[in-house]
Structures are given as C-alpha cells and as structure tokens.
Image (cartoon, rainbow, N blue to C red):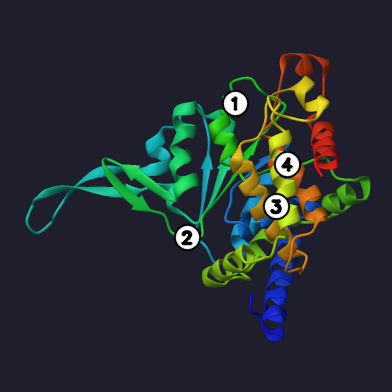
Amino acid sequence: MSLSESDIKAIQSKLNALKGEIQKVIIGQESVVDLVLVALFSNGHALLQGVPGLAKTLLVKTLAASLDLSFGRIQFTPDLMPSDLIGTDLLMEDPESGKRYFEFIKGPLFNNIILADEINRTPPKTQAALLEAMQERKISYAGKSHQLDLPYLILATQNPIEQGGTFPLPEAQRDRFLLQIDLDYPSEATELKILQSKSEKMLHSVEAQMSKSELMKIQELVDEIYIDDKIYRRINKIIRNSRPQSSEIAQVKENLEWGAGPRAGQALVQAAKANAFLNKRLSVIPADIEKLLEPILIHRLILNFNAEASGINKKDIIQTLFNQST
C-alpha cells in the first residue's frame, strides 16, 4: 500500500469527523460505534442485538445521516411480504400511445444503507429475501437480475428478550452477518448524560462527513492492510478448533453442537483489517483478532442441549478458543 503522509492525514481527518458526527447523537457506546464502522469498512453487514431503548435504531439513522448515501428503513412485521422489500412490477400505461407495460418499482432494499428493524419479527420467507442482496449485492425478480448500488450495508436489529411471535434467524441467514454486536445497558454516568441530552433532536443537525467515493476508497485501502502468515494460521486454527468434530479443545467438544464455517475465517480476516485501519495501523496484530473474535463467532456457534441446559456462556468458549489456538 502506497500512501503519502498527506493521504494518511486526510483519511484520519475524515474518520475523526465521521466519529465526531455520530457522537453528537450517540452518547457512550464507543465500542459499539467502532464495531459498526468495522462492518462498514469491511463491506459487511451487522446484527445489532439488545433490549429496547439502547439506541440501536438511532445509531443506524445517525450513521446514515453522517454518510452521503441513500438510506432505507424497513420495520419487520409478521405480515411483511418479500415484495415489500424487493419491489414489484406495476402495470403502467403510456399516455401517448395508450399501450400498457410492466415497470419494476424498486423496494427499500435498493438503498445503500438498510435498517432492518426487528428482523426476527417477520417469517423466514421474507427474511430469505435478504440473502441474495447480502451475499451477492444483487436482487433477482421475475427472471431478471438487478445490481445493487455500492457500497451496500444492512444493519439489522433484534430484541433478545421478547421471543413471543418471533422467527429466529436460520443459521444460513445469521452466517451472512459479518458481526453480531451486543448492546448492554450504559454505565450510571453515561445514562445520566443521556438523560440530560437532546440526542433525538441532535439527529436533525447531523451532516454528511464522507462521500460515497471516499467510503469506497477506504474499503479498498482496508483490503490492502497487511496480515502476517502467523496470524493467518492462528485464525485458521481458531476456526477449525471451533468445530466439535475436529477440535483439540475439550470445552468445545463438550459444549458445542456446531462450530464456525470458512466464511467466519474470511469475516475475521476482513474485520481485523478494518479494526487495524480504524486504529491507524497498516498491519493486523493479535489484539485485533481478540477484540473481534466474539462478535464474529457469537452468532455462528451453536451450543448442544446439555450446554444450553447448564447455562454455558458462549463468550467463555470463545475466549478459550483464542487462548488455546496458538
């Protein structure tokens, strides 16, 4: 990667401006904001999980307002149909000739940033409408393929507590999310600042700090971040050790039904590069892997029945994977 000192300073200035604009509205949650930016710069998607009132929706709206990109919000409900996301053919009539024809009217999935609010509230048939868009950045409808405008980011939210009337995401759908970002309650001091703030009103004052071309340039630069072969091998060993059928780790064999697939390793590589970039480094270090291992694996590992019944915590298993896969 050949970057001049002025290029690096310009990029750092853009990053600082982007984070500063987000922090005008989002108080605290620095690590959550960083993970959302990791997903954005990795050209991946993220699943935000947390109880109501933790500003998941507000965070996504603020990110969209901070970027010069189109934004679409979809409120997922049990009666939502795939055509509500993708779009549909409408019968039109030419006012001059009187001839009728079908015209494809694009749905909200054709925006650059998509907020999929409460994604687990809609049935699997509608959830599946996202798969092709997430993986291939295109949408097929009525025998035709429509390429999506890049960059393309889906940020989905779900509430982990209330499960009545919900449809858990299937494994194939969860695996399409680069990261699962778990939000927790703020500290006492942060919550007091939230009470004293006017964050909802501040959203209207947010201005775009990064253009589409600038964001895509950053995504290209992230691809070029250096990873040493030793770190590649460690990532490979971590992912392989997550599979109980072949793992060298007793805790994994005893508690997991299924481990992570190769896509998890690819996700960890790309996310680690983005995290290094955010921290103004041009190479990945082990600390990048340790920081991102939980959000990469937490939604990809499946506990077995005994582990579920015993209340085993996936986070402990993930930390063991990092420590023992050297």
Amino acid type, mark 3: Tyr
Q: Residue at x 71, y 65 (%)?
A: 277
Crowding at dot 4, Cα within 10 Å, few <14 / some 14-19 / many 20+, comes out as some
Instruction: Give me the disc on residue 25.
Output: none
Residues at marks 1 and 2 touching, judged by CB atoms closer than 8 Å? no
Crowding at dot 2, Cα within 10 Å, few <14 / some 14-19 / many 20+, comes out as some
- Where, quadrant-wise, is the N terminus in this rendering? bottom right
How much space separates mark 1 and mark 2, taking CA atoms?
Answer: 28 Å
Label 3 element class: helix
Disc number lying in front (2 or 3): 3
Amino acid type, mark 1: Pro
Say which of 220 and 191 sits in front: 220
Say which of 264 and 33 sits in front: 264
Query: Would you say 60 lies left or right of 23 here?
Result: left
Q: Which residue lies under the disc numbered 2?
A: 150
Pointer 4 or 1: first along the chain:
1
Disc number lying in front (3 or 1): 3
Residues at marks 4 and 3 touching, judged by CB atoms closer than 8 Å? no
Pointer 1 or 2: first along the chain:
2
Q: Which residue lies under the disc numbered 3?
A: 232
Q: Which residue lies under the disc numbered 4?
A: 237
Amino acid type, mark 2: Leu
Q: Position of residue 149 (x, y in %)?
A: 43, 59
Label 2 element class: loop
How much space separates mark 2 and mark 3, taking CA atoms?
Answer: 28 Å
Q: Position of residue 95 (x, y in %)?
A: 13, 56
**Is residue 27 visible from the viewing direction of this image?**
no
Pointer 2 or 4: first along the chain:
2
Query: Would you say 116 lies left or right of 98 here?
Result: right
Instruction: Give me the disc on residue 168.
Output: 1
